Amino acid sequence: MRFVKAAQLSDLLADDAVRVEVEGTPVAVVRVRDEVFAVSDVCTHEDTSLAEGFVEGYALECPLHGASFDVRTGEVLALPATRNLPTYPVRVEGDDVLVGIEDQQETT
């Protein structure tokens, strides 16, 4: 696994989400107080950007139909979604937010 710069910590508002592309993959980077998480930015119920939704505690709510996910685990918290979100490891180095992605050799 390698880590790719996805955002600047100073650009992330507390209790908010930002959509970024990590090597072609849409990722929602979510800041909850002093913690940062990364999950797929595509709702598993509808093809909608989760970063346009709402953050309440560790819950990220889809703006379209209200499905909700735990940003720590990707677990579904509220219907209509029934499938969990993929999550990505995060490192914060200084002001850089790095998101972990699998190398092609690791997935084959």
Image (tube, helix red, strand yellow):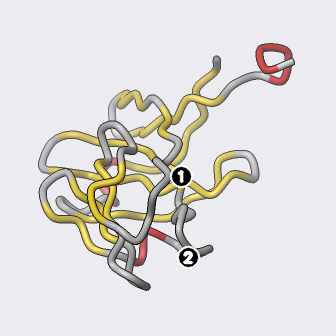
Residue 81 place in picture, x, y as percent = 44, 64
Q: In which quarter of the image is residue 62?
A: bottom left
Mark 2–mark 1 contact, CB under 8 Å?
no
> Would residue 72 appear left or right of 14 to someone viewing this image?
right
Which residue is most to the bottom? Answer: 64
Q: In which quarter of the image is the N terminus?
A: top right
Classify 101 as above or below 43.
Answer: above
Q: Quadrant of residue 50?
A: bottom left
Q: Quadrant of residue 3?
A: top right
Q: Which residue does the image show at 50% across and 64% down from the upper left?
A: 19
Vertical placement of 87 versus 108: above or below?
A: below
Is 66 placed left or right of 100 in the picture? left
Which SS class for mark 1?
Answer: strand
Please provide percent x and percent y for residue 102: 69, 25
Towards the viewer: 7 or 39: 39
**Residue 51, image x, y percentages:** 42, 69
**Mark-to-mark CA distance, 2 and 1:** 11 Å
The answer to which of 78 and 104 lies nearer the viewer is 78
Q: Residue 92 carries which label?
A: none
| Residue at the disc numbered 2 | 48
Tag 2: amino acid: Thr
Q: Residue at x 85, y 15 (%)?
A: 105
Sequence order check, earlier mark of 2 and 1: 1
Tag 1: amino acid: Ser
| Crowd rating for badge 1 (residues with CA inside 10 Å; few <14, some 14–19, many 20+) | many
Question: How packed is label 2: few (under 14 Cα within 10 Å), some, or many (20 or more)?
Answer: some
Residue 40 is labelled as 1
Horizontal relation, residue 89 to residue 33: left or right: right
